Amino acid sequence: MNDRRYSVRDIPRREFLKAGLKGGAILAVSPLLFKGCVSGKPPAAPAIGLDDLNKVIAAALAKGGEFGEVYIEHRISRSILLEEGKFKSAVFGISQGAGVRVISGDKTGYAYTDEISQAKLLRAAEVASYVARGGKSVTPVDVKEEKRPSAITVKVPLQDVADEKRLEIMQRAHDAALSYDGRIKMASIDYYDEVRGRILANSEGLYLSDELPLLFFIVQTLGVGNDTSHMGRERLSRHSGIEMFDEFKPEDAARAAARESIVMLEAKDAPAGKLDVVMQNGWGGVLVHEAVGHPLEGDNISRETGVFVGKLGRKVASDKFTMVDDGSLPGFRGTTDFDDEGTQMKRNVLIEDGVLVKYMTDILSAKQIQADRTGNGRRESFRYFPIVRMTNTFIEAGADKPADILASTPSGLYVQSLSGGSVNPTDGVFNFTCREAYLIENGKKTAPVKGATLIGNCLDVIRGIDAVGDDLDFGPGICGKGQAAEVSAGQPTVRIRGINVGGSRAGR
Amino acid sequence: MDTKAIAEATIKTCLQKGADAAEVYLETSRNLSFEVRKGELETVEEAAGVGAGIRVFVKGKMAFASSNDLGEKALEDAVGRAIAFARITTADPNNVLPDDKGMTEVSGLYDPAIAEIPMDRKIELARTAEKLALTDPRITKTDGARYQEAEGEITIANSSGLVKSFKAGGCGFSVSVVAEKGDQKSSGGEACSRRFFADLKPAEEVAAKAARDAYEALDPRPVKTQQAPVIFSPDVARAILGGILGAVNGERVLQGASFLEKKMGQRIGSELVTIVDDGTRAKGMASEPFDGEGVPTQKRVIVEKGILAGFLYNTIVAKRAGVRSTGNASRGGFSSLPGIGPHSFYMEAGSAKPEDIVRATKSGLLVKEVTGYGINPVNGNFSGGASGVWIEDGRIAFPVKGLTIAGTADAMLDGIDMVADDLDLDRTVTAPTFRIKMLQIGGE
């Protein structure tokens, strides 16, 4: 049982799956342990002034410590489900809370409270300061408000949208899915939006606040054939107002899901064994998110447990491979302007032409590995302290033409889309489940095959990438590392030589 | 805090504001967790929290709102939000609440000692586990040892007159380490969680398992792509049970999104396969006196000697199916609607010894880790990554890594031909060691 596995999912677990989590490792102590989910309205700003925050930070550092921080959050969320032709449920969430963090050497103390009052914050500061007893100490700098430019623009704020508009968007997707093909027997439309308000203040004198809108729209369609069924899906997600649906049409998402459901009804058994794999552009970038991104996170580097420890400046991948994490892509799901520690998000090239040039960091790991802060300190909510996370992670576009990549592959597997997967960051062994895949025969995409697993070692994969297309695209997802983070992953069409494919039919 | 009074007052507010029926789910909790690495305390987290989930029904339409502020004003606001939101959903005659006032007697859910035990003793437990896991010379690095505890109270009240609450808690610890040899790295981890602090396994046992998992995986050798018997260790029970869980979800069954949809009363596996869902076991980590909407929990046989015998239901889905709720309403916390989920979901023990199963296997795979989504509950297809050890002539020969295994639920359940006696009910989704007589393995 390895409790250090990182995973990524394409869709949130629905209730019936969530219950499966009960069996997890330690977090399964009782249902109470489920740290509550998403919610929260930024009502009026809490009655906590800058002076009050200075006092809380001073209290946090009273016993020692080099860094003290207060994080205040409000969240309001709406989630609506349209399934089997009915608007089955509508869920409204309101939550607010604050966390106080102290860093002393390699140690972190954290306490949070649901109630945002000076008394509760001081109490949290006292608890968080526990780890700093006897450590080195600093005098905090008084906080000063700062404004930063934003990569997130909103035309129609989610707060101003009438619920009828949300229903209409969902209904359009539902109808488009069912009218795609008579074999689509059910459509399930999950609509989610939230507005998260953040206030950050720390002992370096930083004070920042903002409000982040987020939309997540998931279409799932059930295709039923003579002897099998397949659930297809498509997702849209942006930090945006409701105008996201003008650019990304709900009908298109629905037809994409329905198309997959129907095509996969004809899927044959996938082959087993080593195959060359061509991965279509888009969400497939999640493979390098898992296989390469997680091992490049600064916390794994500082613990000296990851596969990329000591490899900075070295050639680790093929010449054609450049990998980037960029939290400043406008409106993208992984973009949050400044991260949850106040560091501005930016474009970070991690591997350039095959050479490892940078690790991703948060404040703590940047100090530990003596690197710059890259803007990758993120947290799921005030109930968690920030850790190193990816944002929008992708393989940079190359010069090859996607059609040529396929045509020059005599046989193998063409992966049109992946579900999710996971990696063990220590040994670098990753796995992925194909959502839609085809055999490649004589340089052509032929029969669809059932959801096979791809498995391999991250170093082998990035050395084995020998063709990189010019068609970079992205998809949205949820990354899990003890806490959830909104991410996107992207790639152009690429070819990877010799990946182990787990089908149920003996290979050639 | 008088949570029952708050819950009942909130129900009244719902009815006054126009709900025809309402339910309030209240949660109060306290938790503590920390991590020790290289003998030093590295992180400490502590918090207490509250939350309310309010479900309302207006002319058969359902909506829900949650708040983590239990003040009167905040709850009234949440009630208003829920009722306003009910305007937009579709009326459904199946939208009903339970009225069963009973509670299943389940002992040992709350250990008052956990909160009393001094912090230093808990830190010492984690520190010892880490130190012991590092004693073997093959273990070179530590990924830390963690301790976590939580306790709290759940209260449910609804407008059918149901009001009940229970207190529960638990604690656990885990350790992860890395073994190295040349350029190779291999990780191992083990966790133990219990309702009572005194029931936790000794640090030695957890440490030894973590270290063994790490160093036993060193020097893996390749194997050819082939069909061979595969033995599943208890650590990977979820790979097979997870998909079955999804497929016996009563709502999926009604939607036609389950490969078991038309199989009730039919054979779906070999005679050795009996699967149980139990919410009643004393001290069980997944036990509770009532489910996420207040229905008493049960112990039920889901698959009996290979024959499918039961699905899982909450109240609304049960009404739709024309049956009674099975006490399987599950909540992901106060901020979500009740869905459908298991309690302790396990395959019953057989009579073989695990070592007998290895001995009876001429050439095959013993899997200790399976990655991926497990069995697809919609169509029963299975494919996953696998690592473990290879068996030759009835003996463990060498470690293997980066393999795949694949098949279908039908063939896998039907192919179970040996089941061991090593069932550990302190895990929540679990099985004893068992063997599937033939499965496709992907390798070189």
Image (spheres, rainbow, N blue to C red):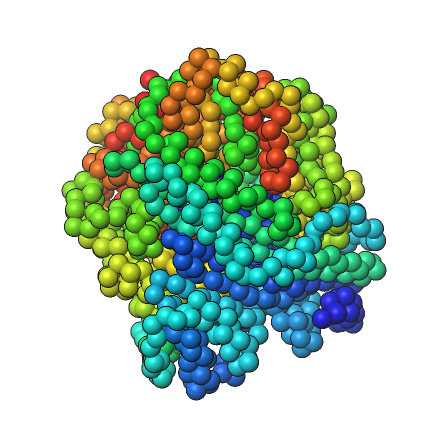
Which of these two is toward me, B203 or B376? B203
Identity of the residue drawn at 50% across and 19% down? B358
- The answer to whether one can see residue A111 in this image is yes
Which of these two is toward me, A141 or A337? A141
Identity of the residue drawn at 64% across and 23% down? B350
Which of these two is toward me, B24 or A30? A30
Quarter location, residue B405: top left
Q: Quadrant of the C terminus of chain A?
A: top left
Above/below status of A180 relative to A377: above
Identity of the residue drawn at 38% across and 32% down? B217
Identity of the residue drawn at 42% across and 75% down? A63
Q: On the picture, is A254 further left or further right than A439?
A: right
Above/below status of B133 relative to B356: below
Give the x, y percent position of residue A115: 57, 74
Above/below status of A465 relative to A100: above
Give the x, y percent position of residue B223: 35, 21
Give the x, y percent position of residue B396: 43, 21
Which of these two is toward me, A420 or B417? B417
Give the x, y percent position of residue A237: 43, 56
Q: On the picture, is A276 further left or further right than A207?
A: left
